[in-house]
Amino acid sequence: MRAVTATGGEPVPADRPDPVAGAGEVLVRVRAAGLNNADLLQVTGTYPAPPGSPPDIPGLELAGEVVACGPGASRFAVGDRVMAVVGGGGQAELAVVHERTAMPVPDGMDWPEAGGFPEVFTTAHDALFTQAGLGPGERVCVHGAAGGVGSAGVQLAATTGARVVATVRREALRAAVEALAGPDGSVRAVDPGGFGRHGPFDVILELIGAPNLPEDVAALAPGGRITVIGVGGGAKAELNLLALMGARGRIHASTLRTRPLEQKADAARRVEAHVLPLVAAGRIRVAVQETFALEEAPAAYARFRAGAKLGKIVLVDAP
Amino acid sequence: MRAVTATGGEPVPADRPDPVAGAGEVLVRVRAAGLNNADLLQVTGTYPAPPGSPPDIPGLELAGEVVACGPGASRFAVGDRVMAVVGGGGQAELAVVHERTAMPVPDGMDWPEAGGFPEVFTTAHDALFTQAGLGPGERVCVHGAAGGVGSAGVQLAATTGARVVATVRREALRAAVEALAGPDGSVRAVDPGGFGRHGPFDVILELIGAPNLPEDVAALAPGGRITVIGVGGGAKAELNLLALMGARGRIHASTLRTRPLEQKADAARRVEAHVLPLVAAGRIRVAVQETFALEEAPAAYARFRAGAKLGKIVLVDAP
């Protein structure tokens, strides 16, 4: 099969052996696979793939058709449209996925949307609901809201009736971020500078990291939660424990990728139950900035690195 | 009435007007009142009493007999032995307590124990169970374990079947801390230096603050929780967000004192339900280092400041 390959250098298309579905796994003919920050870290050699994932093929999410079922795999049949978070190896013509981590692709969702959905929506859903316990009517701040996880988080929060403040560095993208939640106007996109004046917040989805943390803590409502799932702006933060005590606040930090299979499967079940119906109802959509063919992987990665995008860059190989 | 009074200076006994029980409150003839770190901060003027509490009389906890019930107060009758966390004013002959925050004193618990119980056991219980969700068989680290909250936390954790590592700065106190949990030997008292090598920990009860935080994060088990309720060692911490993400960890920080009445009442109900039966069964005891009469308040505060104690310093006025 053809696959994006990278071992410490630039990601390039190359030939690789076809993978084989093991016990409980399905083999998927990949039609779309989104790019994520972790792919950038992996291709530069700073974030190795976890055990059991291809070490040299990036790709944390994919969508496609089941072409074979391994021993004992019974959730899906050959021909079913599925999408999933994977530990790596998604950016290829073929990939194996444990059936418990796969989700059905709703009718009406096209391949680029499906390929850009699993990682960002599962990450944002886990952070907002499973970790931070976001409840109806709470006040939410989403940092880095124009990105993949950010744009997912804005929409997920808005569907709960939350009042959402979305920080977006590029002014030109703010109107589009506000429009993500539909015409109800519950999302306000603002400059990251001095975001705390738009608080207090019950939940803060932190995708930038250390530079925001002091202002995050200062902007917490009593009982507020900061949920850290990205540190693109830096990892070493200053934390005023007395201020956090005063707010009776919490800082959660998490990644999906290092979790055991059962937790990834549980996260997928929660997204299936909560988010896929919203997708089917047209209340959630995947923001796709641009698509590239798998053979154009270098250009896709260059576009991803360039930033200034709304939502996802997706590799596609639709028939 | 006589009361310890302090307005930015040394705490001294003085005469003050008798308080009157308002709606839902009981008037208590105080028999014992423990000293806490917050009292030290209040008497030096850096931690004012919350609204509704006497500004000039310290004392966050008390035990005594009900001598009058305010309008609508029905949980207790005159003569009942009660104990409670209060916003202030506990170190006096008389104090008013909202009946929802008061707990009955179990038979067999003497006044010094009862006067030193509410604040530290409610704080430790809230931090370990309500905040950090400590479950059976988890691995726990309690910092500052010879102090009031620490000695309560060690015992509470040990009753769940937790394996407890207790950091105790003074070597001479370590055997006594290990003995707090009875002869079963589930508590190991260690030097704070390099405590992380005794990990990983599912829950860390942090009473020292900033100096411990980097090692706390490094010693977290996957899904571990750090619950910060004291910053005697400093409040401004360094936090490596990437390390916290790797552990899928959480930092909780809280205080009891600033909470609304309903949350204080809820915390008291949980202690009633969970801890008082353990006290009655002899499985939990209050470590009291030394008692002083109310008129000896300056000596009591001096003893509290001197440290090197196991558990509580309590003012007593038993009949």
Image: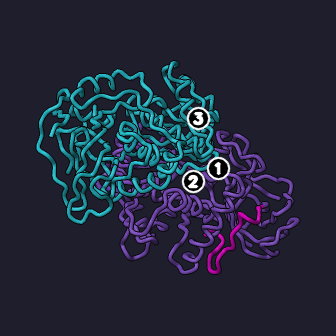
Chain colours: A cyan, B purple
For mark 3, name the chain.
A
Evaluate if marks 1 and 2 touch, with contact meaning CB atoms under 8 Å apart. Answer: yes
> On the same chain: label 1 and label 2?
yes
Can residue B247 be seen here? The reply is yes
Q: Tag 1, which secondary structure?
A: helix
Kind of residue indicated by mark 1: Asp
Camera-side residue: A237 or B122?
A237
Compared with A98, B159 (above or below) is below
**Residue at 79% across / 62% down in the picture?**
B94
Kind of residue indicated by mark 2: Phe
Give the CA separation, mark 2 to mark 3.
60 Å
Which quadrant of the structure image shows residue A164? top right
Kind of residue indicated by mark 3: Gly
Quarter of the figure that contains the C terminus of chain B: bottom right
Can residue A253 be seen here? The reply is no
Camera-side residue: A61 or B173?
A61
